[in-house]
Image (cartoon, rainbow, N blue to C red):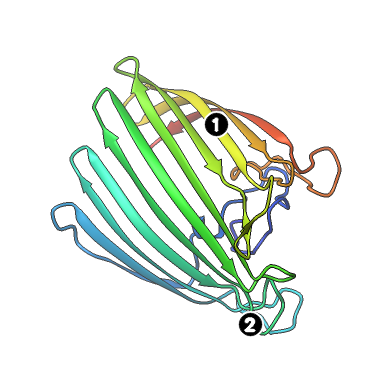
């Protein structure tokens, strides 16, 4: 897991009320990218990150992070589909070894707008190589479905469900290391630029995991305390969004 500064944080160490999203969901510093023009709805993006957060090797927070991202997107009418591949070398920040840890992420997703409703789907596969300890390679698959339904011209119901499968270490499944996330909510448009929003979310961890909300984390402590591995989290979000 990561915070907004790009520092690496393992599963279950997010501080309370922090942002604790995947390392692949951060906006990296010192990145160069090319975004192609759209050709009949098809566009491509490539990006490279060089020496992010570089520190001296051997220090407590030693790192030399580099990476690249490449993706294709198709958006035309009611259809949107995209695929992306992201690879990051964390130097010796995680494993604290000369080889360091390499992580990669493959995602494919899409959506279709029916007018009165829309649906979307996502598949995500993450892999970590040269992990410290007895695990050389760790992989995990995540998939999810979501949708919206317009109940009035100004209001719509939103919902989604995501499932993180068990981790696999060196090709073998690690039992009870997945999680499930369910969310349902309602959005009401006061105008073209102003929306009222209410959302309920439920996160159910398996016995050996301590995942947290990516935004406004609860602050799970997997080694003990009030929130431990296997905890179930519930959250309510009430908001007003205005686009300038």
Q: Secondary structure at mark 1?
A: strand
Q: Which residue is mark 1?
A: 182
Residue drawn at (71%, 45%), measured in percent from left and top? 210
Residue 148 vertical position relative to residue 86 in the rendered view, above or below: above
Residue 103 screen position, x and y as percent = 55, 67
Q: Residue furthest top?
A: 152
Q: Secondary structure at mark 2?
A: loop
**Residue 244 in view in this figure:** no
> Do the CB atoms of the residues marked 1 and 2 lie less than 8 Å apart?
no
**Residue 172 in view in this figure:** yes
Circle number at residue 99:
2
The residue closer to the viewer here, 121 or 69, is 121
Q: Locate residue 8: give its quadrant.
A: bottom right
The residue closer to the viewer here, 143 or 42, is 143
Q: Locate residue 133: give its quadrant.
A: bottom right
Residue 53 screen position, x and y as percent = 60, 74
């Amino acid at each position: 897991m990561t915070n907004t500064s790009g520092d690496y944080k393992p599963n279950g160490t997010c501080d309370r009320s922090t942002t604790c999203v995947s390392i692949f969901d951060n906006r990296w510093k010192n990145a160069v990218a090319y975004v192609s023009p759209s050709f009949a709805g098809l566009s491509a993006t490539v990006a490279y990150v060089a020496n992010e957060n570089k520190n001296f090797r051997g220090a407590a927070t030693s790192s030399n992070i580099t990476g690249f991202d490449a993706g294709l997107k198709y958006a035309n009418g009611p259809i949107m589909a995209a695929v992306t591949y992201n690879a990051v070398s964390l130097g010796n920040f995680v494993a604290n070894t000369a080889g360091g840890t390499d992580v990669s992420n493959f995602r494919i997703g899409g959506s279709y707008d029916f007018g009165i409703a829309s649906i979307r789907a996502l598949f995500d596969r993450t892999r970590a190589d040269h992990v410290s300890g007895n695990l050389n390679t760790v992989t995990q698959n995540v998939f999810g479905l979501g949708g919206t339904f317009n109940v009035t011209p100004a209001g719509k119901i939103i919902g989604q469900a995501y499932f993180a499968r068990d981790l696999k270490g060196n090709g073998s499944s690690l039992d009870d290391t997945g999680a499930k996330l369910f969310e349902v909510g309602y959005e009401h448009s006061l105008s073209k630029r102003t929306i009222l929003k209410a959302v309920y979310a439920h996160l159910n961890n398996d016995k050996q995991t301590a995942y947290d909300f990516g935004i406004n984390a609860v602050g799970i402590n997997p080694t003990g305390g009030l929130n431990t591995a296997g905890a179930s989290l519930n959250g309510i979000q009430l908001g007003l969004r205005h686009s300038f």
